[in-house]
Image (tube, helix red, strand yellow):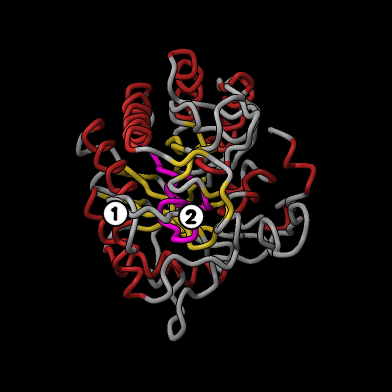
Amino acid sequence: MSTEILFQKFESPNLSLKNRIVMAPMTRSFSKGNVPNDLNVEYYRKRAAGGVGLIITEGTCVGHKAANGYPNIPYIATDEQLAGWKKVVDAVHAEGGKIMPQLWHVGAMRKPGTEPDPDVPGYGPSGLVMPGKKRCHEMTEDDIQDVIAAFADSAKRAKEVGFDGVEIHGAHGYLLDQFFWAGLNERTDKWGGSLEKRTRFAVEIIKAIRAAVGENFPIIFRWSQWKQQDFSARLAQTPEELEAFLTPLSDAGVDIFHCSNRRFWEPEFDGSDLNLAGWTKKITGKPTITVGSVGLDAAFAEEGKVGFAEAKPVSLEKLTARMEKGEFDLVAVGRALIANPDWAIKVRREAHSELAPYTKDMLMKLA
């Protein structure tokens, strides 16, 4: 089995990478006081030294009061937070890697008592946390404009501190995805309605970021059909619906789509072997990143089970065969890179027997 295609250079109008391997964004909760520290610096430095072409950071909250949903999550808003990220960026660049922050707002998934201000409730398009269940603040027009501005400001600050682009988190049932999902967006104004109309919030965020960072700064958009609240949820049931969803996002200024599957090898629609990244590339013509249990034999979390699954290394033959056909352009690796900071180096020299499995205890370690 040849994995050489993973190590070909990637070139697009706004981004050049030494290989096709991307470090997937993974929440680690080690930024005490919401500021990146030396633990974060070394964690990302090791993956850059280990041969990753592009690092996408853990979800990083934009500067909005309701953005966060978990303890010890980094932000990208204040001077202190930017100084912490500057150390991370410099360490990654010194190892020859590139890095982008994933800009994040959890929306309705924020729980009462969450830092930094425990009195701030979750924010959602219609005040829904789950379909049919109201529990949070329903966003006003002013709220929507404040969040759009927060994303644009954080993107501008990311560029100023030396990041190589930004990724917008529009997946997994968080705020942007809550606007996409009919089960949580019951609005009757310009921010709700048809699937295409439900993209408007994300479209305006993309446009605002593009205006803030200029034409040559890469914007990646991560999205998913599935939600944390419902693994079986789907925004688009057909390729036609998918086109209606993706076209406004693409036209707004997305450079690369990061398409989150739980298992990258699963076809998205009947009658075609293409996965979500394959269909997204076919429809938009934009480069895509595939992700989902890459290099491992189990998804991160399984339906009907409590906790996170342990996973063992597996062959990359299915992955590389799809890449060689041009189905997608880049590959995001998650848990395998937690277990193996030098995953890329080991894969390139075909030292597959040296790859460590992902175990549950690794979830709580930053190494």
Query: Can residue 11 be seen at all in this image of the molecule?
Result: no
* Nearer-the-camera pick, 228 or 156: 228
Q: In this view, does 220 lie above or below 283?
A: above
| Left or right of 272 in this view: 254 | left
Tell me where the magenta segment starts and ends, as one range: 165-183
Checking the image for residue 249, the label placed there is 1
Q: In this view, does 22 lie above or below 280?
A: above
Mark 1 and 2 residues: CB-CB less than 8 Å, in contact?
no
Q: Position of residue 237 (x, y in %)?
A: 43, 74
Q: Quadrant of residue 152?
A: top left
Give the Cα separation between the discs numbered 1 and 2.
20 Å
Q: Which residue is drawn at 65% across and 51% down?
A: 336
Checking the image for residue 9, the label placed there is none
Q: Residue at x 61, y 60 (%)?
A: 293
Query: Can residue 353 be seen at all in this image of the molecule?
Result: yes
Q: If you read the primary sequence from the N terminus, does the residue marked by circle 1 or circle 2 appear first?
A: 2
Closer mark to the observer between disc 1 and disc 2: 2
Q: Where is residue 107 in the image (x, y as percent from the top left)?
A: 50, 41
Q: Dot 2 lies on which element?
A: loop
* Crowd tier of the residue under label 1, counting other residues whose Cα lies within 10 Å: few below 14, some 14–19, many 20 or above: many
* Residue topped by disc 2: 184
Q: What residue type is labelled 1?
A: Leu
Q: Where is residue 255 in the image (x, y as percent from the top left)?
A: 29, 49
Q: Residue at x 44, y 61 (%)?
A: 182
Q: Does the magenta stretch include residue 168?
A: yes
Q: Does the magenta stretch include residue 366?
A: no
Q: Dot 1 lies on which element?
A: helix
Location of the C terminus (image quadrant): top right
| Left or right of 145 in this view: 75 | right
* Nearer-the-camera pick, 51 or 32: 32
Q: Is residue 302 above or below residue 274?
A: above
